[in-house]
Amino acid sequence: MSGQESLKTDGFVETGRRNGHLRFELGDRKDEMDYQGIKYVNAQGTIGYIAATAEGQTINFFVSFTAKGQVITVPEIGGEFGNEVMVQNMKLHFVKMGASLKDMFEEHRRCLTTESVQMNRARLDKELDTLPQRVVDMLIAFAKQKGLDKV
């Protein structure tokens, strides 16, 4: 059973597909790539994710809205940031690179246990359109704040 099939049993349905473009710039490093995304939202309208595929690799981005802001779960990138980062009203939570889709989902749910989660399918679906680039932008901003762009 694939990871996507296992999340279907948790009430996730495909809400759309989109092509996107990612831009990354930090210090002397600049990179751009196109991706194809498949968006999913659970039946309760509390968790959404996008499976973004670029250059043969798929990365999943989970998001939920809470009374305090957003909780976003993504694979770790190099381990420079620890387990989670707060950027304004967004909690960016990292899971081990290579974690299965089901494990990412379970970890995202664990992060929500102390939160007042809001239900809004339409808002989640719209958020998924820009989530990959927003995560990249947040990580770049955090890296600059920590001086990692000078390395």
Image (cartoon, helix red, strand yellow):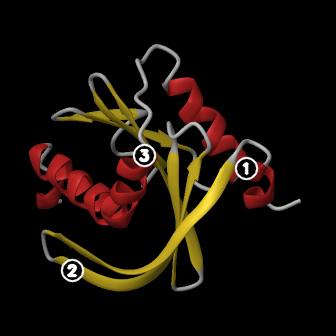
| Upstream in sequence: badge 1 or badge 2 | 1
Would you place residue 63 above or below residue 59 in this image?
above
| Upstream in sequence: badge 3 or badge 2 | 2
Which amino acid lies under the numbered mark 3 shown in the image of this protein? Answer: Gly
Instruction: Mark yes or no: residue 38 visible.
Output: no
Which amino acid lies under the numbered mark 2 shown in the image of this protein? Answer: Lys
Q: CA distance from mark 1 to mark 2?
A: 35 Å
Secondary structure state at the residue bearing disc 3: loop
| Upstream in sequence: badge 1 or badge 3 | 1
Which amino acid lies under the numbered mark 1 shown in the image of this protein? Answer: Leu
How far across and how far down the image is residue 111, in percent? 50, 26
| Tag shown at residue 30 | 2
How far across and how far down the image is residue 86, in percent? 25, 32
Residue at the location (50% across, 36% down)? Answer: 46
Q: CA distance from mark 1 to mark 3?
A: 27 Å
| Tag shown at residue 7 | 1
Q: Residues within 10 Å of mark 3 (few under 14, many from 20)?
A: few
Residue at the location (52% across, 54% down)? Answer: 49
How far across and how far down the image is residue 93, in percent? 42, 37
Identify which residue, 115 or 142, lies in the foreground: 115
Q: Residues within 10 Å of mark 2 (few under 14, many from 20)?
A: few
Q: Residues within 10 Å of mark 1 (few under 14, many from 20)?
A: some
Identify which residue, 146 or 87, lies in the foreground: 87
Q: Determine the residue located farthest toward the top in the rendered image.
A: 114
How far across and how far down the image is residue 52, in percent? 50, 70
Residue at the location (12% across, 69% down)? Answer: 27
Which residue does the numbered mark 3 point to in the structure image? 79
Q: Please tell me whether mark 1 or mark 2 is closer to you in this view.
A: 1
Identify which residue, 93 or 96, lies in the foreground: 93
